[in-house]
Amino acid sequence: MALVRYLIKRFFGLLIVVFGIVTILFLILNLTPGDPARLIAGIGATEEDVEMIRKSLGLDKPLHIRYILYISGLLRLDLGKSIRTGTPVLHEVLIRLPNTIVLAVSSMALALAIGIPLGIVAAVRTSSLLDYLIITLSIVGNSIPVFWLGLMFIVLFSVKLRLLPAGGIGTPLHLVLPSLTIAIYLLSYIIRFTRTAVLDALRQEFVRYALSKGLPRRVVLYKHVLRNALIPVLTITGLQFGALLGGAPITETVFAWPGIGKYIVDSIFAKDYPAVQGAVFIFALIYAIVNLVTDLLYVVVDPRVKLEGGGMRE
Amino acid sequence: MNSLLKVNDLKVHYLLANSVVRAVDGVTFDLKENEIFSLVGESGSGKSTLAYAIARLLDSSYVRIYGEIIFNGINLLELSEIEMEKIRGNLISMIPQDPSAALNPAYTVGEQIAEVLRYKKGLTHKEARDLSIELMKKVGIPDAEKRYLNYPHQLSGGMNQRVVIAIAMALRPRLIIADEPTSALDVTVQARILELLTGLVKEYGSTMLLITHDLGVAAEVSDRIGVMYAGKLMEIGSKEEILEKPLHPYTQALLHVVPRFHKKKRRLKPIAGMVPNLSSPPSGCRFHPRCPYRSKECVLQEPLMVEVEPGHWVSCNLYAMEASYHA
């Protein structure tokens, strides 16, 4: 019952957050200079043409009316029609969503599979050469701009070695380079959070006590330390994963990956308001849901966490 | 009686950034089979360090241990970590100071008992579970089947204390090192836990090294008592000798700070001065700055441990002349 009450409260909180995001986004898009009608009409169009397009898009109405129309559309899950293609935005987003999910899952899985062991090793061998090496690696991974790394991968693996496709989707091979690019960026966070969390857990009294019971060091590390260290790692993973599900705009653009990120970027350049608004709305929704799931996972990992009211308590 | 544990000239030094803390500085004593020996001292006297040094649980990256710890004829300081792992739990177990911090918050108390039985004794999950519940009943945990599934934060301090006692007893070890086992508890609970602990030690034929700052607790349960001050043993003797005929001025001072209600009204006398800083301990006798009987000799010369009566040892210049010298 506590869980149901908690979920209901969190659901309303989620609605408020999404509503806020949508409102801010609407204002930003509509108050920035630039006229989609003129963009669509093209160079050399007459004032009448532009006015007609503006009218057909509903852009002739005042801001607050457009806002009300937009919100009431959202409530009916009508995200409007793309200015560029005329197709429903929801449809456009939904056909791209699986691509984004596949990329998010594979790059996060890769980052966790490499990052957690490296973080543990760095913590256990703290201040050793290996530790410094891993930390350096993580800083480097975080400092390299994603677009540059992506391009370098294309140069090396696609152009020079001709091993992997440079972009697009289709086979699992297409997934390798974009996943790797995102994973390297994520790795730095995963490594550093794991390292700090393991170091922190190692200092706890229960570690020495577990050793005093004569448990093998390996058991103490993988059972007693890791379970407790997992909590902060879970937080960063949840946040990063939520962000990834909104698409990785740069990586998707570099690798021509038809995901939500690339769709948003393209739509911004085309001043395709409904498309941007719709895609970001879906993104905000997913992000909020992933956060909620992360919070629920805490209860599984840490028995001290109790679900209470709108928040959690230790 | 045979000695189960012999500690010879043990030194434990913490290497800090710009100093060396001599937490234990040349301590010699032994534990006879089946006895309860209390190590009494103020906080910072090095008694807990000594306890963890015996179990080899100090972080070797900044701790140096010198001397000998002979357990059952083996010098523990010469064992590898793997060999030590086999001794811990099986032959030497520890009861921690604050069980609520020592138990892992992420696992049920039952699992934390059962894992010992599985990893150390090779029991199956079911066997370990059944035996754990039996142990929990034995240490007086009501509703053991239900409590088995509780997490440490769901139990009281006293119940958690019973859990760690169950863990310590699980493999019937020869030596139990209890580090302030009751100091985190209410006074009323303290007495019951002490009774339980000493009862089990006797029943299982174990030997216990009890670390405490509370002379009252030591008086309650021990056969013999050692008094520690600033990393050194000041006096060792039977419980009666220490309580009735304390020789060392520090022991005498300690007895004055224990309230005794059956004696005639007397003000408690706090010991003047401070516990010394162990990175630069006082010269000569460590207690001399606070000692009412100090002489010039005490400032200059460190007293030797002498046996004033059979089994009653003291390290004080007042008695150095009276008895034969022991190194």
Image (cartoon, rainbow, N blue to C red):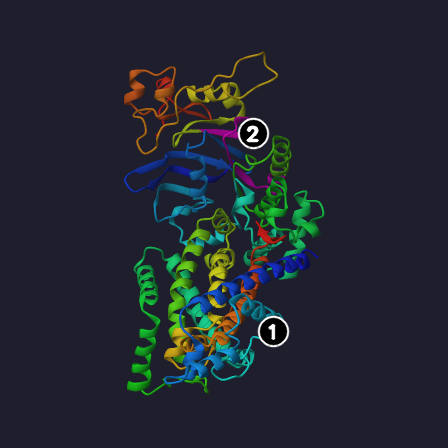
Q: Count numbered badges in the picture.
A: 2
**Is any part of residue B243 visible from this angle?**
yes
Q: Chain for mark 2?
A: B
Q: Nearer the viewer, mark 2 or mark 1?
A: 1
Question: Quick one: label 1, few (<14), some, or many (20+) residues within 10 Å?
Answer: few
| Alpha-carbon span between mark 2 and mark 1 | 72 Å
Q: Closer to the camera, A265 or B96?
A: A265
Q: Chain for mark 1?
A: A
The x and y percentages for residue B159 are 63, 42
Query: In the image, what residue occupies the spot 40% across and 67% down?
Result: A187
Tag 2–tag 1 contact (CB < 8 Å) = no
Q: Closer to the camera, A58 or B250?
A: A58
Say which amino acid is labelled 1.
Leu
Residue A77's mark?
1
The x and y percentages for residue A68 are 58, 67
Residue B217's mark?
2
